[in-house]
Amino acid sequence: MPSTSHSTHAFARAMAGLLLSLAALAPATARAASPAAMLRVPAGDYRPFYKGRSGARRRIPVASFQLDREPVSERDFLAFVTAHPDWRRSQVKRLFAEPSYLADWTTDLAPPRVTGAPVTRVSWFAARAYCECEGERLPTQAEWEWAAERRLVMGDVWEWTSDFNTLLLADPSPVGESSSSLFCGDGFRATDAKDYGGFLRFSFRSSLKASYALKNLGFRCAKDLP
């Protein structure tokens, strides 16, 4: 996977933060007023998909949190871009979204279905902006995987996580071993070799860049408990 320079990525994050600060002055969507849209995920210990250098099957503690019951819909995202023009298809900065961003929308404010169908072709920057404008955030990989392990995450699309480009290991990898080497040959050290779904998810995430906007990639939001 091609790498993005640290300075470019840092600049993109800084600019996104500025846009979020401005967006916070505008009202959030009506979705934020519906607590029923989220479920409470109990605390637990998530077993990382990959083992670390020791080979031990350790677990990552996950605190209880709230998570959207369903991926964010086209209808919800339409309300977001209506209130925040900077994230419309014709106005979003290329630093934050590639040309395929919302490419299935016929105009800035015309999604293909305007239904409860999951919104897709949304970049990580846009997904994060949406969640933060709702007073929420993207779930971490550990949170998403823990909820999936408990069969609380259902959907027909791939989903962004806040740390999608961070490989979760039980402990640090051997010096000189790249994350990509974990996907082939003797470098592959899954805690459960039969977890093909987990392998696909981590392989997919490792191929992403924050500006990507794919036709089968959506997101849902999470929130810390008080």
Image (spheres, rainbow, N blue to C red):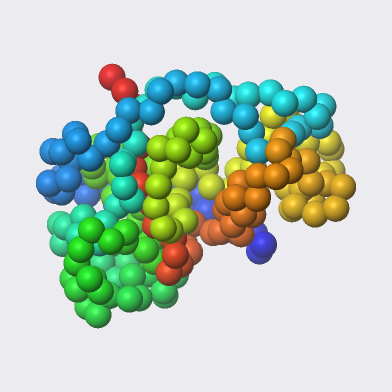
Q: In the image as oriented, which residue stretches furthest toward the bottom?
A: 106
- Where residue 39 sits in the image (x, y, percent)? 30, 33
Q: Residue at the spot x=32%, y=66% of the render?
A: 92
Pick whichever, 137 or 93, lies toward us.
Answer: 137
Q: Is residue 96 above or below residue 52?
A: below
106 relative to 150, above or below: below
Q: Is residue 122 visible?
A: yes
With 61 as the anchor, is 36 left or right in this view? left
- Marker count (numbered): 0
Q: Quadrant of the C terminus?
A: top left
Residue occupying the point 23% across, 58% down: 116
Q: Quadrant of residue 63?
A: top left
Hey, which residue is sitting farthest right in the picture? Answer: 186
Please identify the quadrant where the N terminus is shown.
bottom right
Residue 203 x/y as whole percent = 64, 54
Q: Nearer the viewer, residue 25 or 108?
A: 108
Residue displayed at 44% across by 21% down: 43
Is residue 136 placed above or below 226 in the rendered structure? Answer: below
Of 153 and 106, the residue lying toward us: 153
Corner quadrant of residue 55: top right
Q: Percent from the top left, x then y, of residue 142?
A: 53, 34
Res 96 visible: no
Question: In terms of depth relative to the viewer, which is nearer, 121 or 21?
Answer: 121
Please give left or right for residue 60 compared with residue 158 in the image: right
- Residue 11 at x, y percent in the picture: 47, 53
Residue at 37% over, 63% down: 120
- Image-based side of 13 in relation to 29, left or right: right
Give the answer, above or below, for where 17 lies relative to 225: below
Q: In the displayed structure, does residue 128 sit left or right of residue 5?
A: left
